[in-house]
Amino acid sequence: MTSADKMIRHGSIDDVNAHQCLKISNYEDTVRQLDIYYAIVKRQLLRFQSPITGLFPMLSSDLHIGSVRDSIYCAVAVWGLYQAYRRIDDDRGKSHELGQSTVKCMRGILECWVKQSARVEAFKTRQSAAHALHVKFHLTTGEPVLTDEQYHHLQIDVVSLYLIFLVQMITSGLQIIYTQDEVAFVQNLVYYVERAYRTPDYGMWERGSKYNDGKPEIHASSIGMAKAALEAINGCNLFGDKGASWSVVYVDIDAHNRNRSIFETMLPRESSSKGVDAALLPTISFPAFATHEEHLVQLTKANVLRRLQGKYGFKRFSRDGYKCVLEDPGRRYYHEGELKEFEGIESEWPLFYVIMIIDGVFRTLPDQVEEYQKLLKARIYMDEYGDPVIPWYYYVPREYIENERSEPNSVRRIPANTGGLFLWAQSLFVLAQLLTGGLLHVNELDPIRRYLPSYNRPRRAGRYSAFQAKPTFGIATDLVVQVVLIAESMRLQAMMGTYGIQTQTPHEVEPVQVCSSTQLVHVYRELGVCPKLKLTGRPIRPVGSLGTSKIYRVCGMTVLCYPLIFEVSEFYLYRDMALLIDDIKTELQFVGKYWRLSGRPTVCLLVREEHMRDPHFKQMLDLFAMLKKGHCDGVKVRLGRLQNLISSSCMEHLDFMSQGEFPSAIFTQFRQLEHEYIGYQSLTDVPRTLTYREEETCYAALRGRPTADALHALRNAHGLYARAQLLGLLLEREGPMYEVNGVSVLESLKSLYQSAGELRHWRAVRYCSSLLNHTVDSISPFITTVLVNGKQLMVGVIGQKETVFDKPMTPGEIQSVMYSTIQPYDVIGAVLQQEVVLYCGRLIGTNPDMFRGILKIRVGWVLEAIRIYMQLFPRERRAADSLESLSPYTLRALLQRVLSVPDWADERGLTPLQRRQLEGCLCRVPKHFYIQVWDILLRTPKGIIIHGQWIPAQPTLVNMSRSELSFALLVEEALVRVARPARRQLCVELLCVLATILRRNPELYLQHALDLDRLLDDAHHTYAKDRGSAGGAEEEEEALSAAPVAVTVGYLARAVVNSVLQGAAAPHGQPSCLVS
């Protein structure tokens, strides 16, 4: 018998324990069974635990490298047995030994990481692979063994997994964290994973993108693990029952919500290159249970089972070359196009059978448990002690590769012969056996009840916020959002009273302090500070809408924070009252939809005196009247006095501040304005903001003239926009500190910015804002939201340099891109495009259907579409308004109109030409369009030419796959080269027609390169001839673009038949082809 045959000798799980499936009826039987597993754990796991660091290797044969992920799973198996032994009265010391072995491992990992605290500190501000915590250490010394260049350590899921089990084990009674320094370090680990939603990492399989080219990407499994970790550790006392107020961990609820929404948006995909991945199983099931939206769980699970399950285990993902015989072990990265080699022969991992057994136990699915036990039983063999061994993976032998490719699942695979145990699989197998044998209850393996939805979990005792809310499909029907109205002055309060709207002034809510959320940010900076480890506290990240809906207790004082939308920021959007009213509605909708904590959210709305002077103040009063009635666009609200609402609010105790006095230096109360005369009776008494107008003047001619001429023009200029242009000219030539009449150009610009803002002269406001290099507040999360919805963003002026946002970026990087890419060609465009990016980020979160068919949101072209819309419907703006002069609210409304063309095109009577112009700007394509182009390319060996850009059939078809994002981007990139939007849309229609013809004529292959320009010109010419109109090429093109779709399809089909099929290879001499 060969060694391979020995390894394949299938043992039975029942050999280990003949009675495992029987209900354990007596004490002795329980003890006997537990002792069997104790022996297995000692021989298969604890034998390989380092006596010094407590770490475990990935393979038992590895004597040098300890792996953090595998160590955690080994510790969990040992802890699971510890939990099982706790049922027994006299365990002869085994329970204590197992518990302490678990503590030794978890503390060993902690100590390795604490030595790298400088990395954690750097990672908080910039989530870079160079600052990632290591996930491989030396087994005996605990020192790093692989540098960042040798190995990709950035794996967010590992740190998240550690946090989940740290909480589980502490909840079970183990003491793992010993000192205040360690508490601070764990709090910093929370900051480390908080931004998982915008951190491309290398994922559970340590390789990043599917192509194995060294590039990280956003992974749903990493974000899901982080979301689960944040949920688990929020309000957890790391000292357990004996803990103090300063050993509690806090989580930013808004960071949790971003991870949750982005994770659930990505499912069932794993990443942009991996449509399906087995890494999602431990994320949606044990140990993370990262989502309780049942339809998402089922969709993801079904996707994994359908596409990855095999007879020997599960594939990790399609075209996974890891440990395949064709993989070159001497080369770290793959060559371009190499993935195709691994298709259909990926290794299969029995580990996932075990995960499915555990999943079946947690979800009470006995049929699933039985199914995977049978499958696993066929793959297990026995070691020399008679213990069951789960092979690491099964691979296709080299001599059978072609057989497997031609007939999938036909070849007998061989288990990995590593000479050691794969400890991750062994540890999960122990847990599966304990669970199915009735020796361990799911509540003992999951004491914090991750497997239950948050509203079914036991309420954590104590004074800290906890995830407890009811499940939501849309908006929770029974959640009430509490609203407090704070008026800036008594006269404003009196005037609001005449309209029946009750408000309170800051003095009336005392001793509660009304503060800005930015002050809360400074309080949180004290959280997690550890001078010994050189760790600062929470990084300066804004507190979001959910965070400002809690009421805070700080050093005995009660603090109410108003949301970010009321902050007076440097960016000008806050000055647009109509936008603010819309934002208040959005804020209440958002809080109503995503609130997950116990206690009601309390939103503080500020009413300032400057609001009264705005022409839109009447609409704000209407909004308050609606809130008074108890609803806001479907959200239940309760408007009331703060003193009456506090008892039902969500209260967060910031006890980490309790060691000192109330930080009055940090908290400055929202200031109440005092007036001698408080007699405004109604809006008619309030002085109005003037409506400002100025003649537009262009100063381009001054660019080549001396500075003195610009100064002379500035002295004579009275218009705000005129002065803004001239100051911009001086700024460019002489620098910001150049003085005019004793005031620097920079100060003059800031002053002008304020004046233009007060007068709502949006063109001048935007011009000054751009010159001052302003960036929209919190733009990063909105860009990330666009990206995880499967879109990319591109900013830049049409015809000039453009920059793609294809991965999350820091605010500093975004500012640099905006101003280097756009400002040199279009000053106002630098801020205008930021506005559009912000609005797109908001819209795609609430109305993803608006973006259907758009792959890359090209902001320059979106603005062009708005310009076309304004020409088509001049009544929707004032005659003098240009795009740059529109208020932010109007711009957002027009953006929504342009993105929803299909919804209103027929109703508003859009002509085919106008519709093609608008949709062409957005480069919107029909469903499955890029898959159709792939199918065309399969039948066009010489490739496709779009406006001079050639898409070759080879190597494109080898390097990419049919539903891959990179292929779609390649086609979209070529389409955008067509300068006129209507013609671009005709190209899309032409490709759809050709795809239909080829689908109906499977025998056709195109012998020549497919030149779309030539076909379009032919169709235009035929159409013009048929209509008897003679004109130039442009007139011909416009004529066809203006024709209804039914007409253009006919002419495009004729062009295809005439021009392309004459040279096509039709077998058996059949020249006919099916078109209709």
Image (cartoon, grey):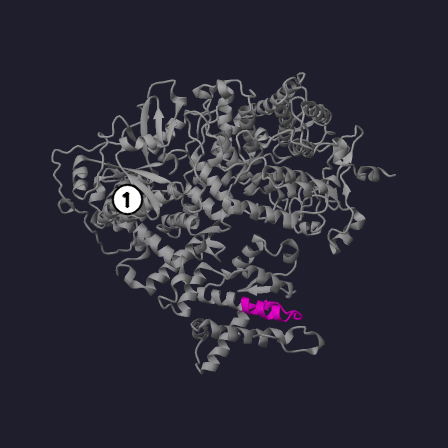
Q: Nearer the viewer, residue 19 or 638?
A: 19
Q: Is residue 136 above or below residue 1060?
A: above
Q: Is residue 292 above or below residue 409?
A: above
Percent across and percent down for residue 201 are 56, 39
Q: Residue lying furthest bottom in this view? A: 1028
Magenta extent: 991-1012
Report whether 1067 appears left or right of 675. right
The quadrant of the rendering that contains the C terminus is bottom right
Percent across and percent down for residue 553 are 35, 26
Label 1 sits on a secondary structure element that is helix
Report the residue at 45% width, 19% height from top: 244
Percent across and percent down for residue 133 are 57, 30
Q: Nearer the viewer, residue 994 or 587?
A: 587
Report whether 121 appears left or right of 1074. left
Q: Which residue is mark 1?
A: 627
Check residue 500 for magenta coloring: no
Q: Residue lying furthest front in this view? A: 25
Instruction: Please tell me how crowded label 1 is: few (under 14), some (14-19), or many (20+) other residues with Cα within 10 Å.
Output: many
Percent across and percent down for residue 335 are 67, 48
